[in-house]
Amino acid sequence: STTKVKDVITSLCNTKSPLRIVVTTTAFGIGIDCPSIRQIICYKPPSLEEYTQESSRAGCDGISSNACLLYGSASRYTN
């Protein structure tokens, strides 16, 4: 539900929260404003543009963060 999603986002963005890992679809990250995200792992994004959008969610507060791209060899030729 929308309320549960909002609760997860609120908890994730709270640096004192025990919630540190969230596995989601691309739709979850659209419009999220959570500057304390340190690691983004993108699995087979459909395009370079989407990978750029997804990975830019990390380190919005200026602190060093990481983005990791996971893809298969066939993805090189389709995207």
Image (spheres, rainbow, N blue to C red):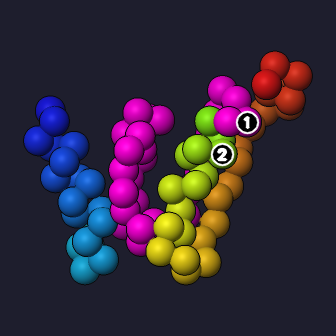
Dominant SS type (magenta):
loop
- At horizontal 38% and vertical 44% (from top left) the residue drawn is 31
What kind of residue is marked 2? Thr
- Tell me the crowding category of disc 1: few under 14, some 14 to 19, or many 20 or more residues within 10 angstroms, Cα based: few
Do the numbered discs 1 and 2 sit on residues whose CB atoms are within 8 Å?
yes
Picture coordinates of residue 27 (x, y %)? 41, 33
What kind of residue is marked 1? Leu
Q: Is residue 3 left or right of residue 30?
A: left
Disc 1 target residue: 48
Q: Label 2: state its secondary structure.
A: helix
Segment colored magenta? 20-49
User: Is residue 26 positioned above or below 69 on the image?
Assistant: above
Viewer-nearest residue: 24 or 26: 26
Q: Is residue 38 left or right of residue 50?
A: left
CA gap between label 1 and label 2 equals 6 Å
Q: Is residue 45 visible?
A: yes
- At horizontal 55% and vertical 80% (from top left) the residue drawn is 63
